[in-house]
Amino acid sequence: MAGNSEPLSPRAKLAVTAGKAAAAVSRAAGRGSGSVIGGKVALRLDPDLLGRLAQHLDVILVSATNGKTTTTRLIAEALRAAGPVVSNALGANMPAGITSALAGGSDARYGVIEVDEKYLAGVARDTEPKAIALLNLSRDQLDRAAETRMLAEKWREGLTGTKAVVIANADDPLIVWAASSSPNVVWVAAGQEWKDDAWSCPSCGGVLQRPGDDWVCAECGFRRPMPSWALNGDYVLDPHGAAWPIHLQLPGRANKANAATSAAVAATFGVPPQVALERMYQVQAVAGRYDVVTFEERQLRLLLAKNPAGWLETFSLINPPPTPVILSVNARGADGTDTSWLWDVDYTRLAGHPICVIGDRKLDLAVRLEVAGLDFRVCADVDEAVRIAPPGQIETIANYTAFQDLRRRVGN
């Protein structure tokens, strides 16, 4: 466990105070939580502050293309059974946001930290984590994060020889490749619904064979490792073969997979699966995701989908036709400015749903839906979309900044 750290130096204390002040000013000005600007100010005054703030914590890092915010929340809830937790629960997952989160956790025992994929190796170097959870890798923001194989290689290099226990998804070849340089890996069979980024071997470039749930490269022998934890329907199987029921308020198979990984992480710190899974039931929504809100006398369920893999999972969550659906896509800096990923999403799964399209890039999405042969309406905003939507709860699916826009407008 993490030992007692030395008291913060005067410089570090000044940096924390200045960061909190900057965050407060940002919140007062209505510019969000202020966590990013607060962290930037603090790190400017003390570039080593992140490492200093992590000294007294047992740090758990969580990274992935999809599911890291939810998994971070589930792990945090599970570990609260063993002691106080500090976490970047709102998803500010780059060094500045992480620094802001840890600055508020002086009395915590555990630091459960979501990390943007691009920054994982650096944050791991600074915080010396006890555990790292790696969930999945798929195409996302190619203009910023680069190709998935390159990202997996950066992880592999950055985690070589790490002292952390790495809890990794055995079903994702890119994750297995990235984690295999680590000396202590706990493999979890969490599944992989989206396989379009994992047909070639990350080790040699050969074609992966996928018999059933297994995968193997016929050319170099790189293959799926034997998992010690597994998701099996509505149960988590632990290393002893015991089956523990998953009861979540969060919907979908992907969240059961997140719970399985979270249970494996919690067990690393001595929290039994039954206790961990019971605590996860408390999570009803994550930073607004899955919330059902009332807007203009209609019920809207808010769903986030940022990339092809995320949209595929989200389509499996929505109620069947003729449930109305609102789709919203932006392409701002936080989303990635390249919208070519829209063509990788199988929108024919929305056949039969009345569809309204909004967002900065609604015309890009409209062209994609036209090619998919779907009926839809292009609307100016969510207000218009709600007015013309047929009766019933409305499913709203949006990418990152479009989701934030929706939350502000509907009062969530």
Image (spheres, rainbow, N blue to C red):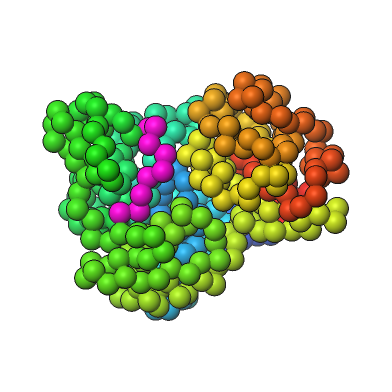
Quarter of the image for the N terminus: give it. bottom left
Residue 386 occupies quadrant: top right
Query: For this rendering, which residue is in front, 81 or 23?
Result: 81
Residue at 42% over, 29% down: 146
* Residue bounds of the magenta highlight: 189-197
Q: Is residue 180 left or right of residue 323?
A: left
- Magenta stretch, main secondary structure, is loop
Is residue 390 highlighted in magenta? no
Q: Is residue 303 visible?
A: no
Query: For this rendering, which residue is in front, 135 or 191?
Result: 191
Query: For this rendering, which residue is in front, 247 or 2?
Result: 247
Residue 121 occupies quadrant: top left
Residue at 27% over, 43% down: 212
Kindly give the residue lying farthest to the left in the view shown.
220
Where's residue 45, x and y in %? 52, 51
Q: Is residue 46 left or right of residue 218?
A: right
Residue at 24% over, 27% down: 207
Relative vertical location of residue 296 with respect to residue 9 in this rendering, above or below:
above
Q: Is residue 304 left or right of residue 174?
A: right
Q: Is residue 283 left or right of residue 33?
A: left
Relative vertical location of residue 118 with respect to residue 361 in this rendering, above or below:
below
Residue 28 occupies quadrant: bottom right
Quarter of the image for the C terminus: give it. bottom right
Is residue 190 highlighted in magenta? yes
Relative vertical location of residue 110 with respect to residue 150 in this rendering, above or below:
below
Where's residue 357, x and y in %? 72, 34
